[in-house]
Amino acid sequence: MHPDHKKSDYIPKNPDQFRAWMFNLLDYLNSHGTDWPNIPVERSQELATQFVAFVNVREKELRTPTPANKLDRKQEQEKIVHIVRAYVNQYLHFEPVTNVDRAEMGIPNHDTIRTPIGRPTAEVETDLIPWGIRRVQVTFRVRGSTVRGKPYGCTGAIVAWHVGERQVASPEELGYSALASRSPYILTFPESERGKVVSMALCWENAKGERGPWSEIISTIVP
Protein backbone atom coordinates (compact mmCIF):
# COMPACT_ATOMS: atom_id res chain seq x y z
CA MET A 1 0.00 0.00 0.00
CA HIS A 2 1.25 3.47 -0.85
CA PRO A 3 2.18 5.33 2.37
CA ASP A 4 -0.29 8.16 1.63
CA HIS A 5 -3.29 5.88 1.18
CA LYS A 6 -3.84 5.18 4.87
CA LYS A 7 -3.58 8.88 5.70
CA SER A 8 -6.15 9.82 3.07
CA ASP A 9 -8.74 7.18 4.00
CA TYR A 10 -10.76 9.74 5.92
CA ILE A 11 -11.12 11.88 2.78
CA PRO A 12 -14.19 10.68 0.84
CA LYS A 13 -13.48 9.50 -2.69
CA ASN A 14 -17.04 9.92 -3.95
CA PRO A 15 -17.12 13.44 -5.49
CA ASP A 16 -20.36 14.50 -3.83
CA GLN A 17 -19.42 13.11 -0.42
CA PHE A 18 -16.02 14.79 -0.82
CA ARG A 19 -17.77 18.05 -1.69
CA ALA A 20 -19.93 17.85 1.45
CA TRP A 21 -16.90 16.95 3.58
CA MET A 22 -14.96 19.94 2.22
CA PHE A 23 -17.89 22.32 2.73
CA ASN A 24 -18.02 21.22 6.37
CA LEU A 25 -14.24 21.61 6.78
CA LEU A 26 -14.13 25.08 5.24
CA ASP A 27 -17.19 26.21 7.17
CA TYR A 28 -15.53 25.13 10.42
CA LEU A 29 -12.28 26.85 9.44
CA ASN A 30 -14.19 30.06 8.68
CA SER A 31 -15.82 29.92 12.12
CA HIS A 32 -12.78 28.89 14.18
CA GLY A 33 -9.67 29.55 12.10
CA THR A 34 -9.20 33.06 13.47
CA ASP A 35 -8.34 31.40 16.80
CA TRP A 36 -5.51 29.42 15.16
CA PRO A 37 -2.70 31.91 14.39
CA ASN A 38 -0.38 29.08 13.31
CA ILE A 39 -2.24 28.81 9.98
CA PRO A 40 -1.13 31.35 7.33
CA VAL A 41 -4.07 33.15 5.76
CA GLU A 42 -2.69 32.55 2.25
CA ARG A 43 -2.72 28.76 2.78
CA SER A 44 -6.38 28.85 3.77
CA GLN A 45 -7.15 31.05 0.77
CA GLU A 46 -5.34 28.61 -1.52
CA LEU A 47 -7.45 25.78 -0.11
CA ALA A 48 -10.71 27.68 -0.63
CA THR A 49 -9.75 28.81 -4.16
CA GLN A 50 -8.88 25.29 -5.28
CA PHE A 51 -12.11 23.97 -3.81
CA VAL A 52 -14.12 26.51 -5.81
CA ALA A 53 -12.34 25.26 -8.95
CA PHE A 54 -13.34 21.69 -8.07
CA VAL A 55 -16.97 22.67 -7.42
CA ASN A 56 -17.16 24.43 -10.78
CA VAL A 57 -15.93 21.42 -12.76
CA ARG A 58 -18.16 19.08 -10.74
CA GLU A 59 -21.19 21.22 -11.60
CA LYS A 60 -20.13 21.13 -15.25
CA GLU A 61 -19.81 17.33 -15.10
CA LEU A 62 -23.29 17.01 -13.57
CA ARG A 63 -24.80 19.24 -16.26
CA THR A 64 -22.95 17.51 -19.12
CA PRO A 65 -21.62 14.09 -18.03
CA THR A 66 -19.15 13.54 -20.87
CA PRO A 67 -15.88 11.57 -20.48
CA ALA A 68 -13.91 14.81 -20.91
CA ASN A 69 -15.82 16.57 -18.13
CA LYS A 70 -15.44 13.54 -15.86
CA LEU A 71 -11.68 13.60 -16.46
CA ASP A 72 -11.53 17.33 -15.67
CA ARG A 73 -13.39 16.73 -12.41
CA LYS A 74 -11.12 13.84 -11.43
CA GLN A 75 -8.02 15.95 -12.07
CA GLU A 76 -9.36 18.90 -10.06
CA GLN A 77 -10.37 16.54 -7.26
CA GLU A 78 -6.86 15.07 -7.16
CA LYS A 79 -5.41 18.59 -6.89
CA ILE A 80 -7.63 19.64 -3.99
CA VAL A 81 -7.13 16.32 -2.17
CA HIS A 82 -3.36 16.80 -2.39
CA ILE A 83 -3.67 20.36 -1.04
CA VAL A 84 -6.07 19.54 1.78
CA ARG A 85 -4.02 16.51 2.88
CA ALA A 86 -0.90 18.68 3.17
CA TYR A 87 -2.90 21.40 4.95
CA VAL A 88 -4.30 18.93 7.49
CA ASN A 89 -0.93 17.31 8.14
CA GLN A 90 0.86 20.64 8.54
CA TYR A 91 -1.64 22.64 10.58
CA LEU A 92 -4.62 20.68 11.90
CA HIS A 93 -2.93 17.86 13.80
CA PHE A 94 -1.38 20.25 16.32
CA GLU A 95 -2.45 22.68 19.04
CA PRO A 96 -4.33 24.95 19.29
CA VAL A 97 -6.57 22.64 17.18
CA THR A 98 -8.19 20.17 19.58
CA ASN A 99 -9.52 16.62 19.32
CA VAL A 100 -13.05 18.03 19.32
CA ASP A 101 -12.16 20.41 16.49
CA ARG A 102 -10.78 17.54 14.41
CA ALA A 103 -13.83 15.40 15.07
CA GLU A 104 -16.12 18.24 13.97
CA MET A 105 -14.08 18.61 10.76
CA GLY A 106 -14.13 14.88 10.01
CA ILE A 107 -10.38 14.51 10.62
CA PRO A 108 -9.10 11.49 12.63
CA ASN A 109 -7.20 12.09 15.84
CA HIS A 110 -3.70 10.64 16.15
CA ASP A 111 -3.07 11.34 19.82
CA THR A 112 -1.46 8.70 22.06
CA ILE A 113 -4.75 8.38 23.94
CA ARG A 114 -7.47 8.20 21.35
CA THR A 115 -11.18 8.45 21.67
CA PRO A 116 -12.45 5.60 19.49
CA ILE A 117 -15.00 6.49 16.86
CA GLY A 118 -17.31 3.57 16.26
CA ARG A 119 -20.41 3.07 14.17
CA PRO A 120 -22.98 5.79 15.03
CA THR A 121 -25.61 4.65 17.51
CA ALA A 122 -27.63 7.86 17.88
CA GLU A 123 -30.90 8.26 16.00
CA VAL A 124 -31.83 11.26 13.88
CA GLU A 125 -34.83 13.46 14.63
CA THR A 126 -35.95 15.46 11.61
CA ASP A 127 -38.60 17.82 10.27
CA LEU A 128 -39.64 18.65 6.69
CA ILE A 129 -40.70 22.20 5.90
CA PRO A 130 -41.94 23.40 2.46
CA TRP A 131 -39.45 26.09 1.41
CA GLY A 132 -40.84 27.75 -1.67
CA ILE A 133 -41.61 26.26 -5.07
CA ARG A 134 -40.14 22.74 -5.55
CA ARG A 135 -38.01 23.08 -2.40
CA VAL A 136 -38.16 21.33 0.97
CA GLN A 137 -36.04 22.23 4.00
CA VAL A 138 -34.77 19.29 6.04
CA THR A 139 -33.81 20.09 9.64
CA PHE A 140 -32.14 17.38 11.70
CA ARG A 141 -30.51 16.76 15.07
CA VAL A 142 -29.76 13.96 17.48
CA ARG A 143 -33.05 12.52 18.72
CA GLY A 144 -33.96 14.13 22.03
CA SER A 145 -31.51 17.01 21.60
CA THR A 146 -32.54 20.66 21.47
CA VAL A 147 -29.57 21.70 19.26
CA ARG A 148 -28.55 20.68 15.76
CA GLY A 149 -25.01 19.44 16.46
CA LYS A 150 -23.74 16.16 15.01
CA PRO A 151 -22.76 13.20 17.19
CA TYR A 152 -19.05 12.95 18.01
CA GLY A 153 -17.07 11.60 15.03
CA CYS A 154 -19.87 12.01 12.48
CA THR A 155 -19.35 13.99 9.27
CA GLY A 156 -23.06 14.50 8.75
CA ALA A 157 -26.39 12.84 8.06
CA ILE A 158 -27.35 10.70 5.08
CA VAL A 159 -30.60 12.08 3.68
CA ALA A 160 -32.48 9.42 1.68
CA TRP A 161 -35.73 10.06 -0.15
CA HIS A 162 -38.32 8.78 -2.63
CA VAL A 163 -40.92 10.69 -4.63
CA GLY A 164 -44.12 8.96 -5.64
CA GLU A 165 -47.89 8.78 -5.20
CA ARG A 166 -47.72 7.56 -1.59
CA GLN A 167 -45.40 7.36 1.39
CA VAL A 168 -43.13 4.33 1.30
CA ALA A 169 -42.77 2.01 4.29
CA SER A 170 -39.11 0.97 4.27
CA PRO A 171 -35.73 2.76 3.99
CA GLU A 172 -34.82 0.23 1.27
CA GLU A 173 -37.41 1.95 -0.95
CA LEU A 174 -35.64 5.32 -0.70
CA GLY A 175 -33.73 5.41 -3.96
CA TYR A 176 -31.96 8.79 -3.71
CA SER A 177 -29.51 9.94 -1.07
CA ALA A 178 -27.08 12.74 -0.23
CA LEU A 179 -24.72 13.57 2.63
CA ALA A 180 -25.78 16.68 4.56
CA SER A 181 -22.91 18.07 6.63
CA ARG A 182 -25.10 20.48 8.58
CA SER A 183 -28.71 21.37 9.32
CA PRO A 184 -30.80 22.70 7.67
CA TYR A 185 -30.43 21.01 4.29
CA ILE A 186 -32.43 22.13 1.25
CA LEU A 187 -33.68 19.68 -1.38
CA THR A 188 -34.80 21.00 -4.78
CA PHE A 189 -37.11 18.90 -6.95
CA PRO A 190 -37.94 19.02 -10.70
CA GLU A 191 -41.22 20.53 -11.85
CA SER A 192 -42.53 17.07 -12.77
CA GLU A 193 -42.50 16.04 -9.09
CA ARG A 194 -44.60 18.93 -7.76
CA GLY A 195 -47.67 17.70 -5.91
CA LYS A 196 -46.22 14.25 -5.29
CA VAL A 197 -45.31 12.70 -1.94
CA VAL A 198 -41.66 12.84 -0.89
CA SER A 199 -40.79 10.19 1.70
CA MET A 200 -37.59 10.64 3.67
CA ALA A 201 -35.42 9.08 6.36
CA LEU A 202 -32.02 10.03 7.76
CA CYS A 203 -29.14 8.36 9.54
CA TRP A 204 -25.79 9.59 10.89
CA GLU A 205 -22.57 8.71 9.03
CA ASN A 206 -19.07 8.82 10.51
CA ALA A 207 -15.77 9.67 8.80
CA LYS A 208 -15.26 6.00 7.91
CA GLY A 209 -18.55 5.84 6.02
CA GLU A 210 -20.27 3.74 8.70
CA ARG A 211 -23.95 4.50 9.15
CA GLY A 212 -26.17 4.51 12.19
CA PRO A 213 -29.84 3.49 12.50
CA TRP A 214 -32.39 5.03 10.16
CA SER A 215 -34.91 7.50 11.49
CA GLU A 216 -38.60 6.90 11.07
CA ILE A 217 -39.87 7.68 7.57
CA ILE A 218 -41.68 11.00 7.30
CA SER A 219 -43.24 12.65 4.28
CA THR A 220 -44.63 15.85 2.84
CA ILE A 221 -45.95 17.10 -0.49
CA VAL A 222 -43.46 18.59 -2.93
CA PRO A 223 -44.60 22.26 -3.09
Image: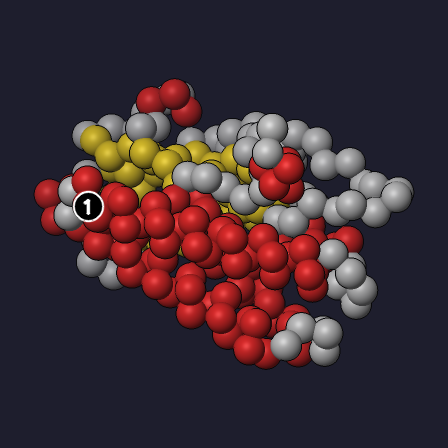
Q: Quadrant of residue 25?
A: bottom right
The residue drawn where x is 60% and y is 57% is: 86
The x, y position of residue 12, in whole percent, is: 50, 41
Residue extending furthest toward the right = 113
Q: How is the image coloured?
A: secondary structure
Q: Residues within 10 Å of mark 1 (few under 14, many from 20)?
A: few
6 in relation to 75, above or below? above
Residue carrying label 1: 68
Seen in the picture, residue 218 relative to 80 is either above or below; the reply is above
Quarter occupied by the N terminus: top right
Identify the amino acid type marked 1: Ala
Q: Is residue 196 above or below residue 212?
A: below
Question: Residue 109 vs residue 222: left or right?
Answer: right
Q: Nearer the viewer, residue 104 or 9?
A: 9
Counting labels gives 1
Q: Is residue 58 visible?
A: yes
- Residue 30 in percent (x, y) is at 57, 72
- Residue in the picture at 55% in, 33% down: 209
* Vertical order, 91 against 199 (above or below): below
222 relative position to 19: left or right: left
Res 41 → quadrant: bottom right
Image point 67% across, 55% down: which residue?
Answer: 89
State whether residue 10 appears in this view. no
Task: Indicate the position of residue 181 as horizontal and vertical percent values.
Answer: 50, 51
196, 209: nearer the viewer? 209
Q: In the image, 34: left or right of 218?
A: right
Asked where in the image residue 4 lies, by quadrant, the reply is top right
